[in-house]
Image: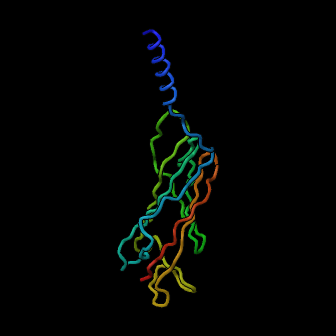
């Protein structure tokens, strides 16, 4: 009987030690992976077009957990338009840290609201943006995204799918 109790105690100890979950080890610089978009076709932002919102999702990890540096005034996320390399800055949304470790992971959704005179516009040769065009009914483009943490570490770069902009 005593040997059975010792065996059970050892088995229970081994089971408990194997069931402990180790915190994941992430690099100190942010790492991002593309997760998708809500659509790949949008109307350009014009007074006659319906309001349209493009949502871009990506996952992130950061080993030292030093994201969201809003006090510095320097945006955390850069979204670059493939047509002219213009950059739209975003701040990482506020989030609650969980757990005892410093490493964090999650998903971020960037929303680009296409409203009259702002948002995503068609770009034409020798023409201003956000105007109708019968010669060029659509534009195609993609976004390139990267982020940085408080220490200035920059992430890898990700790219969205091809986006078609309706220029009507």
Residue 65: x, y in percent?
56, 42
Name which quarter of the figure residue 142 lies in. bottom right
Picture layout, residue 5 above or below residue 59: above
View extreme (top): residue: 2
Left/right of residue 152 with respect to residue 13 in the rendered view:
right
> Residue, x 53% and y 51% (percent of image)?
60
| Nearer-the-camera pick, 163 or 78 | 163
View extreme (bottom): residue: 135
Residue 38: x, y in percent?
41, 65
| Nearer-the-camera pick, 80 or 100 | 100
> Residue, x 49% and y 87% (percent of image)?
136
Looking at the rendering, in which quadrant would you find the N terminus?
Answer: top left
Name which quarter of the figure residue 114 lies in. bottom left
Picture layout, residue 26 above or below residue 166: above
Left/right of residue 103 with respect to residue 118 in the rendered view:
right
Residue 88: x, y in percent?
54, 64
Image label count: 0
Q: How is the image coloured?
A: rainbow
Looking at the rendering, in which quadrant would you find the C terminus?
Answer: bottom left
């Amino acid at each position: 009987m005593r040997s059975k109790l010792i065996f059970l105690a050892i088995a229970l100890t081994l089971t408990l030690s194997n069931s402990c979950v180790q915190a994941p080890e992430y690099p100190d610089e942010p790492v991002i992976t593309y997760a998708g978009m809500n659509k790949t076709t949008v109307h350009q932002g014009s007074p006659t077009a319906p309001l349209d919102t493009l949502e871009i999702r990506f996952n992130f990890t950061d080993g030292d957990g030093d994201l969201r540096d809003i006090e510095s005034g320097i945006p955390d996320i850069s979204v670059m338009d493939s047509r002219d390399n213009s950059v739209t800055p975003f701040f990482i949304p506020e989030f609650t840290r969980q757990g005892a470790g410093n490493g964090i992971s999650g998903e971020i959704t960037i929303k680009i609201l296409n409203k009259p005179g702002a948002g995503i516009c068609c770009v034409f040769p020798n023409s201003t943006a956000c105007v109708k065009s019968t010669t060029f009914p659509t534009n195609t483009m993609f976004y390139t995204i990267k982020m940085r943490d408080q220490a200035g570490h920059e992430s890898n770069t990700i790219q969205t799918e091809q986006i078609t902009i309706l220029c009507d």
